Amino acid sequence: MKLASLKNKRDGTLVVVSQDLKFMATTESIVPTLQAGLDEWEDIAPELEKLYDKLTSKEILGSPFIPSLCAAPLPRAFHWADGSVYLNHMALVRKARGAELPESFLEEPLMYQGGSDILLGPHDKISVINEDWGIDLEAEIAVITGDVPMGISAKKAPNHILLVMLANDISLRNLIPSELRKGFGFYQSKPPTAFSPVAVSPHTLGKNWDGKKLKCPINASINDKLIGNPDAGTDMNFDFGELIAHAAKTRPLGAGTIIGSGTVSNRDRSRGSTCLAEIRTIETINNGKPKTPFLKFGDTVRIEVFDENNQTVFGSIEQTVKKFEANK
Amino acid sequence: MKLASLKNKRDGTLVVVSQDLKFMATTESIVPTLQAGLDEWEDIAPELEKLYDKLTSKEILGSPFIPSLCAAPLPRAFHWADGSVYLNHMALVRKARGAELPESFLEEPLMYQGGSDILLGPHDKISVINEDWGIDLEAEIAVITGDVPMGISAKKAPNHILLVMLANDISLRNLIPSELRKGFGFYQSKPPTAFSPVAVSPHTLGKNWDGKKLKCPINASINDKLIGNPDAGTDMNFDFGELIAHAAKTRPLGAGTIIGSGTVSNRDRSRGSTCLAEIRTIETINNGKPKTPFLKFGDTVRIEVFDENNQTVFGSIEQTVKKFEANK
């Protein structure tokens, strides 16, 4: 099934969306919000699935689905942990600095905890106070889990993946070096993340989901120009089972935890890049310095995945960068 | 006023607690959970205050308040960002390594983002899979904010502090070095955090709250032996206004954001320490190596603040460390 949250109050209003993303049906007789559904997933999911089947088969008509009215599937979440498991990306970043990829990067996934109290809808503006902070997109795959027990194995962890979606892990690149130097990880350099209009159950993804990863290219564009379309199923050094097991090593995970893959990146350079930092890194490796600037106010970004029939799977993330005037 | 959440489902049941922590009254006619109250604080808080006044003045009787039945005031939260602003602690840790405190540590607060999907009640067990991970307590002050606009100044930020509580930021010390070496900050080394039975409004703290910090000693004990009672209002290099402004530099904060102070620590060594890492650090500075072990299964920790009348303000955090058997 495909689920979306229309903008409404803090947690949105859950709707079921047809397979072709053309129609939606309200879930008010089943559950009001996605988080409430995740909290009781075993009882709620079968009801939502039935509604999805009726909507997709046109047994019920529904109303037109308009992605621009969507919040993130979870407009706020209790846990958002983002990995960085396409190590080609990390290897390039290191190479530009003249450094090797540490061995430990191959042994366990990199993961940071992101802000989840405010998550952006797919068409929300990227509001930034200062253009000089180095505004960048990162096209990612993300999953939503149910309750996960502490200490779960990577083998069992995929059973807890309930939904899959796309993310734009917006980053402020010029704030990263000083933040990481302090040793406590990312905080100010990772403003609110945006998510695709719909979250899709693994079952509905069919052969495009192998149980642990999405096997489709992800397209990233800036101002309508494609910058990359790497395959999400290729060069993923740790799959979502391994990511969830890593996250749950010392704690249980609560229902509605979002786990991200990090910027999708393929070794095949012809597939381009899905963030500007990587493009600038390759420019630095080739020419000694970066040429492509970071995002400017007014720039637009677009992230989308198409299936084998060239049909959009999750809908598109489409965001414009906008100056925010702080009222100090 | 003083608020607590009784253990019930995922978000608990909100109750108002009398000033002396002896009685409680249900808020079911006002709002079911603390998060729901925070979401509509301007409307809800005056009603809760009225109930608190009636309960404390014994105009209504209430029922006995039993801290062991409490979840954390927010049993799960959308945002938990923890600072480290008692720099004496950081200076000692560095000194033991033979390193100076970087200048940048004096310019802006250190802050990491903690897991908030599962927060522990004040008497919940500390469940850890492996004793060798270096289990430690950290006694902290934490505040809960309302909605905070992006880019707020440190001067205006304290207006958004709605409640104050105590935290035990449980840490797995032996997982920290390899985790920080990877550059992405804490994740596995910070399992679920525990909070005091009640959260108290700044107004109710009276002269013990100066608008930006708590001016009381915080007591930390292990197996009923006091290890420290540093004053939370002394040697706090950044106050909660500065911490909130730091957190909101590149993003707005959603209602129910928890901001922590980091381990309370005074330069006056006679006040002891509120975490074992600091005790071990001082032992290393004095004798070349640490003597005090980290927590073992079966050990108990206690964190509490008393007012000038020797009355408990937030109730006590009392936790026992327990082995967790993972079902892989």
Image (cartoon, coloured by chain):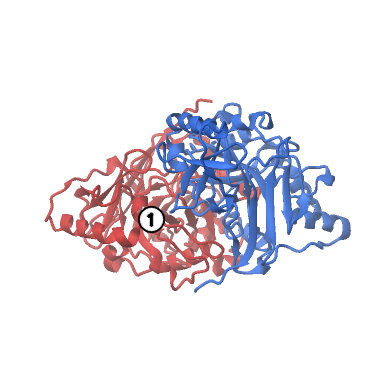
Chain colours: A blue, B red
Residue A316 left/right relative to B25: right
Residue B295 left/right relative to A212: left
Residue A41 % position (x, y): 46, 33
Residue A99 % position (x, y): 79, 51
**Chain letter of disc 1 in the image:** B
Residue A303 left/right relative to A268: left
Asked whether residue B69 appears in the rendered view, the answer is yes
Q: Amino acid at mark 1?
A: Asp
Q: Is residue B138 above or below residue A48?
A: below
- The residue closer to the viewer here, B27 or B76, is B27
| Residue to which mark 1 is pinned | B39
Quadrant placement of the C terminus of chain B: top right
Q: Is residue B205 above or below residue A208?
A: below
- Quadrant of the rendered image containing residue A44: top left
- The residue closer to the viewer here, A85 or A216, is A216
Residue B198 % position (x, y): 30, 51
- The residue closer to the viewer here, A310 or A302, is A310
For numbered disc 1, what is the local secondary structure?
A: helix
The residue at the point 44 percent across, 73 percent down is B155
User: Mark 1 packing: few (<14 Cα in 10 Å), some, or many (20+)?
Assistant: some
Residue A16 % position (x, y): 51, 39
